[in-house]
Structures are given as structure tokens and as C-alpha cells.
Image (cartoon, rainbow, N blue to C red):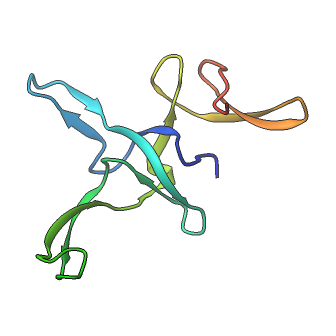
Amino acid sequence: MYIKAGDTVAVIAGRDQFVTDKKGKTTRKTGRVLKVYPKTDRVLVEGVNVIKKHTRPTQQNDKGGIVDKEAPIHVSNVAILDPKQNVPTRVGYREVDGKKVRYAKKSGESLDK
């Protein structure tokens, strides 16, 4: 899988694709990848695909109630943001010093530190 935890991604498909500001301008939703689920090809993105989960009272949460929580989104619905141009880009691989390194196809800049 070409996306790792900590990457900044943009949603390129689905109902959470765009966000509208107060002036009416629409932009793509972006967020940081919190967790990657390689077996199911899903990623957990901060602030994207937020659902309401009903929880019952526990020792940690005395009241219970309705909690907002992020749900995983399929990896095909997100694209990594180019670090230079801040636009969605595809990912390529090249070998640097004997190591396989990811790079952004639009700018050619390395994605791995």
C-alpha cells in the first residue's frame, strides 16, 4: 500500500469529497492519516467520514450518549497531497542509496523523510 500513517491526503471520491466555506467556495477535504488497515485496503483519516456512534455508560464515560468518530475510508478514495504544490498526486517509487523511496509524480519531490 502506498499510503502510510502520518501522510497528508485529500479525498478524491465519495460523499466527503468537498467542503464548502462561508463564502460558498468548495475545496477538497484533507486530513492526516491516523491508521492504515492493509488487509481491508482502508485508511483512517482525521476529520473525514465522521459518524455518530451511540455508546452506553462505562466506568470511563459515566453518561454514555452519542459520540462523533472517524470511520475508515477506502484507499482508492484518497490521494496523497504533493508537498510542494499542495495538490493531489500519484505516488512513484525510486531507489535512493539502496532504499526504496516514495516520491510525488507531479513535482518529483520525496514523500519519505
In the displayed image of the protein, which residue is found farthest to the front? 59
Res. 11 visible in picture:
no
Q: In the image, residue 12 lies at what x, y percent?
A: 40, 41
Query: Which quarter of the rendering shows the C terminus?
Result: top right
Q: In the image, residue 4 lies at what x, y percent?
A: 59, 47
Residue found at x 59% / y 34%: 90
Residue found at x 27% / y 29%: 27
Q: In the image, residue 75 lies at what x, y percent?
A: 50, 53
Up the image or down, 25 lies above or below 90; here it is: above
Q: In the image, residue 93 lies at what x, y percent?
A: 75, 35
Nearer to the camera, 36 or 41: 36
Counting every numbered tag in the picture gives 0
Up the image or down, 45 lies above or below 83; here it is: below
Residue found at x 11% / y 76%: 63
Query: In the rendered view, does 18 fall on the left or right side of 37?
Result: left
Nearer to the camera, 101 or 75: 101
Res. 27 visible in picture:
yes
